[in-house]
Image: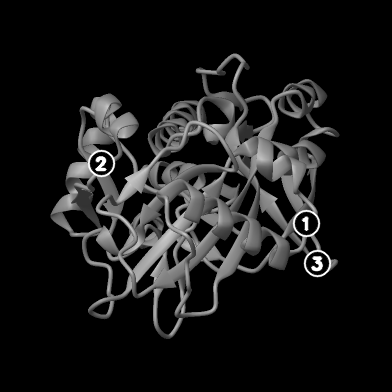
Amino acid sequence: MQRIAVVGAGLAGLTCARVLQDSGLEVIVIEKSRGVGGRLSTRRTDSAQYDHGAQYFTARDERFAAFVDARLADKSVAVWTPRLDARLAGSSKEPWFVGAPGMSALGRAQAQGLDVQTAMRVQSLANENGRWCLGMEDGSALDGFTAVVVAVPNAQAVPLLESQTPDWADQLARTPLEPCWTLMVSTDDGLTDLDAGLPGTGAIGWWARNSSKPGRPTEAGRHDWVIQATAQWSQAHLDASKEMVESELLLAFARELGVSTITPILPPMTHRWLYSRRAAGFAAFTEPWFKPEIGLGVCGDGLVHSRVEHAYLSGLQLGQCMVGALS
């Protein structure tokens, strides 16, 4: 039996793992976080929940559309029809989908039936006598793998790849992912008639009334908001305190909506995504990254474009390529 390790349980890694397992291969997925889905994330408290990573997704490719249809059928995905500002309303002509009851539901659905080991960080890769050994952060090792898939953000993939495929490591090092500060806040004031906006200038790159998404549990009269900073603002304030980020983004949000002040009714929260989206201006790598002679592959939206659809397609294509090579 050929054993394959997939490093990273975002949508790309999970999709690749599912293709491999469905073909009869033995697969283990190793994830450094406590949950699956990567940026398909939902932050929950006793009182509220916020999709603080990916906000929504569309389905343009027929392969991803078929996947979304299946998730609509099992109710882990729903259609979101927000009231949009003029800039968004003028550019959006296709359905918006969200995980239900949170964005994290999409990753959990894709992980069903897979052997996923969470809270484990892979620190190194070594190939000895045609078998892969994964060195873990705690000093332990997992070995005996026929092939390895690296499905983590570009900067995190570089140290894993540089001893094995320095050309790949170099390409990823030169294709950065941008940071994003995210603010999560709840109010008892509706603040605006709109549910989402895409400001053209200033600190904020996106805001949404998270509680307007289908299936989100919320108390009557409470509005849960997600405010995401631009990549430029996030980079300039990369090491700022959470308190400073909270204060500045709350002020910027008030200015954006034209209100004098915003009074949270729950303690606001912030999250810093170091690797939120692929920087613009870099060529996309559209072919699967796989070296069959050593059994090493790479996938993820960091290779192509930072849409949920691209993460899925990257994992799908690599999985299919590996099945053909390994069978």
Q: Mark 3 falls on what kind of element? A: loop
- Label 2, secondary structure: give it: strand
Sequence-earlier tag: 3 or 2: 2
Give the residue displayed 75% in from the left and 48% down from the top: 237
Mark number, residue 301: none
Q: Compare marks 1 and 3 and give the one earlier in the sequence.
A: 3
Look at 39% across and 83% down and name the residue there.
47
* Residue bearing mark 1: 240
The picture places residue 202, in percent across and down from the top left corner, at: 58, 38
The three-letter code of the residue at mark 1 reads: Ala
Who is closer to the viewer here, 164 or 248? 248
Q: Quadrant of the C terminus?
A: top left
Inter-mark Cα distance, 3 to 2: 43 Å
- Label 3, on which residue? 140
- Mark 2 nearby-residue class (10 Å; few <14, some 14–19, many ≥20): some
The residue furthest bottom is 46
**Residue under label 2:** 96
Type of amino acid under label 3: Ser
The span from disc 1 to disc 2 (Cα, nearest Å) is 33 Å
